[in-house]
Image: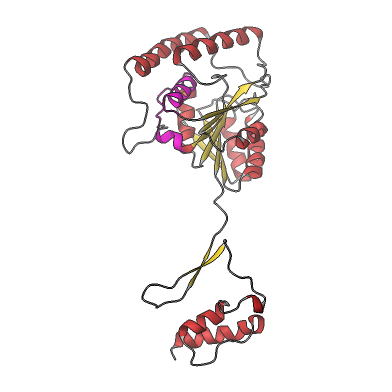
Amino acid sequence: MTDLERCILAAAAVASKHLGPGPAPGSSRTAIVRALTGLHRGPEHGFPRAGPERSRVPPRANGGGVSRIMVKGPPRAESLSIFFPAYNDWGTIASMVVLATRVAEALTDDHEVIVVNDASPDHTGAILESLQRRYPRLRVVTHERNRGYGGALRSGFAAARGDWIFYTDGDAQYDVRELERLWAERGAVDLVNGYKIHRSDPWYRAVIGRAYHHFVKALFRLPVRDVDCDFRLIRRTVFDRIRLLEDSGLICVELMAKVGLAGCRIAQVPVHHYHRMHGRSQFFNVPRVLRVLVNMVGLWWRLFVRHEPIGPPAGGAGSSS
């Protein structure tokens, strides 16, 4: 008898106190292992018979070896990345991180929260440093220079590791707890897009926003009710099919236009929109709007006239930072 068999027999002697008599000395190695693991025990010993979730695999063709048990475990939980672009959002970013962490914990065990600090000149960096000591799953991506809203989103998409990626702005105009509504609708789609039930902005922003939405929806043939609602849950594999290039707020139009051209499946969910509690919008000023309009014409020309490829280069990432 080998040393290995003696060790197995010694372990079997201990196990027999709980599982019943062990194998006799001189038994074959197959009998020893079967006795130790309880494979010889059936319903008459109080053990359940193999069923759909526990099925016996036939021995190898040469007759050798030990029959194995295939145990079908629960499916792997889908992972979730939540991220916020942050610029001058020191007054709201802490509450966003805390709420996002609680929501993520309720939805899946495999989650992370990311904040992209787009070279914010306020206290955002110091607040995030303190939050990281309290929330180990918080990751911070810091830009040395401001890259714009589109640049911050591209950094967030590139940093995210989850099967699903959710983002919204760090200014708390959306309630991150409503991510639960989007998560419930993700099953058969590639992207779940929120749309504002009511826009809580000054009247002139509401008017401009509505005109902007109708204009870009017609120009880019967008398949959504609200392209200006930055409350989105996106399947990670979408970025195997599209590549984002814009650095400005035009990235939202680019994202939804390319998602539509790629044939991605979309669900839409109503969400609440709230008054800004801190800071002010970086989009609504004349020079920025003019730049966006010029860039918009260029994007439309590339996508619908020149028909440039919308996907990443071979071996590349669709959310290049």
Which residue is at a point 54% across and 13% down the rendered structure image? 213
Instruction: Give, as a single range, the part of the protein colored magenta.
Output: 237-263
Colouring style: secondary structure
* Frontmost residue, 291 versus 142: 291
Which quadrant does the N terminus fall into?
bottom left
Q: Position of residue 279 (x, y in %)?
A: 62, 20
Q: Is residue 158 visible?
A: no
Q: Where is residue 92 in the image (x, y as percent from the top left)?
A: 65, 28
Q: Can residue 260 be seen in this view?
A: yes
* Frontmost residue, 124 versus 217: 217
Please give left or right for residue 262 compared with residue 209 in the image.
left
Q: In which quarter of the image is residue 176?
A: top right
Please give left or right for residue 45 compared with residue 286 in the image.
right
Which residue is at a point 54% across and 36% down the rendered structure image? 188
Q: As displayed, is residue 136 above or below residue 145?
A: below
Number of numbered discs on residues: 0
Q: Position of residue 80 (x, y in %)?
A: 56, 41
Which quadrant does the C terminus fall into?
top left
Which residue is at a point 56% across and 38% down the rendered structure image? 187
Magenta-colored stretch includes residue 252: yes
Q: Where is residue 50 in the image (x, y as percent from the top left)?
A: 58, 68
Q: As displayed, is residue 107 above or below residue 145?
A: below
* Frontmost residue, 253 versus 58: 58
Q: As displayed, is residue 225 above or below residue 137?
A: above
Which residue is at a point 50% across and 28% down the rendered structure image? 118
Q: Quadrant of residue 78?
A: top right
Q: As displayed, is residue 211 above or below residue 230?
A: above
